[in-house]
Amino acid sequence: MSIHVKSNVDWVGIKDWETEYFHGTEYKMGRGTSYNSYLIREEKTVLIDTVDHQFSEQFIAQLEQEIDLNQIDYIITQHAEHDHAGALSALMAKIPNTPIYCTEAGVNSIIGHHHNPDWNFRTIKTGDTLDIGNGKALVFVEMKMLHWPDSMATYLTEDNILFSNDAFGQHYCDEHLFNDEMNQQELFEECQRYFSNILTPFAPLVKAKIEEVLSLGVPIDMIATSHGCIWRTHATQIVEKYYEWSQAYQEDHITVVYDSMSGNTRMIADALAQGIRQASPNTSIKIFNVSRHDKNVILANIFRSKGILVGSSTMNNVMMPKIAGLIEEMHGLRFADKTAAAFGSSGWTGGAVTRIDGRLKEAGFNTLEPMHVHWKPDNNALKSCVEFGQKFAQNWQTETNVEHTQTVVEQQHPNDCTCMICTVCNWVYNPTLGEPNQQVAPNTLWKDVPETFLCPECHLGKDVFVEFEG
């Protein structure tokens, strides 16, 4: 069943009330999701995206009730992942010569997923337009690494609709389609959960891409996402939120997360939270047992936090596996400008606390001295834990850590440096050193680095680098 969006634009997607997970089992969806596909009927008929592959048959059947498939002039594939382009093979089996508009990286991704290199691909770049008649055109914008290399967005002139792909969406299935019809608290919870768990690693790119789109000066009356709602009332409110979230976002919030074998580390967590409350009554605190709580809710809370305390019992001289897995995800999400400390209990060696502290440093957190308790904490140990929590909360009453971090950066990169930094993984290209593994000699300026250069860490190209502003 289609839903009218605006003028000659209809939603022809699928609502999935039952799905629980995305990216394997890495992202738990408590409220389902939608796969948004859009049909534009001007002088030319355009289909923007399809749906998840498991709904291919249903999608095609519903689309055939709307239109003779042979009347579709163009297919726009903004992203090749299966929840966007999963029904593409079934559709192309019926209309095999229809042009598919996508990015150059999109061609590779689509072929990789569907194994049909002979499809009629038309590659686009930012600023390219496609006339669809009646005085309207589609304007394409590359959205590389938001959140795949092939990602792009599409703008419909005159109707002023931005088909934003994954940006500004959320895994949220509702009987309504438009933002003003939905429960606002649930909607923004899911928006932040989506950003924090999926887009956080690319936050610098989000900021840069929003600035690029806004610089075009085009009016945006609607934002039609690939998942969740269509933003039609104060549509750019979600753009403002994304811009805020993309800049080392934090609230007056502290997250305490732990795993415990026999309850001792839980006792420490409770005492730490008590100390935080005493020292900073207005700071909100959330405590999670990683084995009992939704991991994605935990990560969303860490995203909101200015401070994080991570604890574990010691098992086999290392941290417990679920804490280790959580820290690995924290590392991958590359949270910015957050302070953390390790804590935990042990029977004899206490190896978990040391390893947590080391991994938090590797993940880019500003770390404070860890808290370790032998055996079950007695009253004196619990008093020490309360005091530790107080000191942790008081950390934001001084700028010591920030000043220290800035001093180190300035020492490594003087103000007149010409370094470039990867906005995805933060690897820094220093012209003085070059990159010998790619035959880039020392003292090679960035403008002279070959266009084939790839970031040694994330393997993306030169276009994701910006000037280092240490």
Image (cartoon, rainbow, N blue to C red):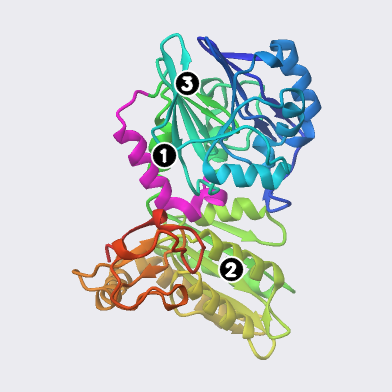
Indicate which disc, 3 or 1, sits on the residue closer to the N terminus.
Answer: 3
Whether residue 193 can be seen here: no
Q: Are marks 1 and 2 in contact (CB under 8 Å)?
A: no
Q: Nearer the viewer, residue 418 or 221?
A: 418
Instruction: For marks 3 and 1, give the CA distance.
Output: 15 Å
The residue at which mark 2 appears reads as: 269
Image quadrant holding the C terminus, namely bottom left
The residues colored magenta run 195-219
Q: Residue 441 at x, y = what percent?
A: 35, 77
Locate residue 402: give its quadrant: bottom left
Amino acid type, mark 2: Ala
User: Residue 232's mark?
Assistant: 3
Above or below residue 392? Residue 103 is above
Amino acid type, mark 3: Arg
Q: Nearer the viewer, residue 291 or 224?
A: 224
The residue at which mark 1 appears reads as: 241
Above or below residue 292? Residue 103 is above
Q: Residue 182 at x, y = what percent?
A: 57, 24
Pair 1/2: label in front = 1
